[in-house]
Amino acid sequence: MKKLCISGSICIISLTTLFPSQAQTIYSQIGSTGFSLGYAHNFENFNLRSDINLLNYDSNFNAGNMQYDAKLKFRNLGFFADYHPFKSLDKFRLSGGFFLGKDEATAQAISYKHRPISEGDWVLGKLESKSIRPYLGMGWGFGKQSKGWSFIADIGASYSQFRSSYSASPKLLAQGGQRLQAEREAFQEKAEKLNWYPVIRLGISYRY
């Protein structure tokens, strides 16, 4: 996390140094990438942006015959370029860029065929994204506006193949290796659905 903050600060300082006379905006959003805090450098009809994204999220899901208790932990930096194609609708924008940083998820099995996992036994699945995930989307905000507050929104998707690992207690492995292999495959199929991760964010910005 400390490295992410340092990297984000360096990017922001670089933008302000290269283009000191352009309009500048700070913004904050909340959505599927968690809490976001960012900076945008505004030009005639496009922007360069960078933000820090933090997400901790707990959820339950089913895969195969097992139910899992999942914990998502996202810590990443976003780098984007926005283009405003319409003069009459100047706040509408097309956005492209990427997220930098490994996002992780752990899933502890809590039941098998609706029966709780026996005490002392465990099944654990882990997911880890690639370090760079491309992003495409569209949004509202950062257009030609006077100084002050404004509403902003983003909708799009990032892409990454998640690496997965799957392990179980020695007792469960000894009792049913083939059965666990089927559960591993079901878990992997669930993980592949996350390759395209939806990005939906709402927030406010302040131009100065």
Image: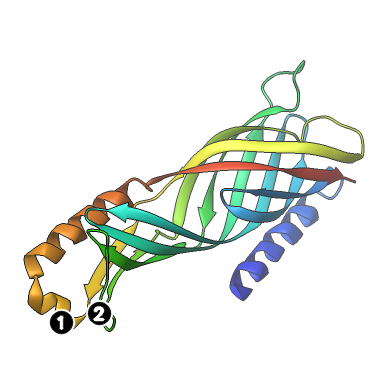
Between 110 and 41, which is closer to the camera in this rendering? Answer: 110
Q: Is residue 174 left or right of residue 116?
A: left
Outermost residue toward the top in this view: 88
Tell me which amino acid carries mark 2: Asp
Residue at 91% from the left image edge and 34% from the top image edge:
146
Q: Position of residue 22 (x, y in %)?
A: 84, 42
Q: Which residue is mark 2?
A: 121
Residue at 78% from the left image edge and 44% from the top image edge:
204
Q: Position of residue 50 (x, y in %)?
A: 66, 52
Number of marks in picture: 2
Q: Is residue 152 above or below residue 111?
A: above
Q: Is residue 111 above or below residue 15?
A: below
Residue at 73% from the left image edge and 29% from the top image edge:
45
Q: Which of the 4 image quarters holds residue 193?
A: top left
Residue at 18% from the left image edge and 56% from the top image edge:
185
The N terminus: image quadrant: bottom right
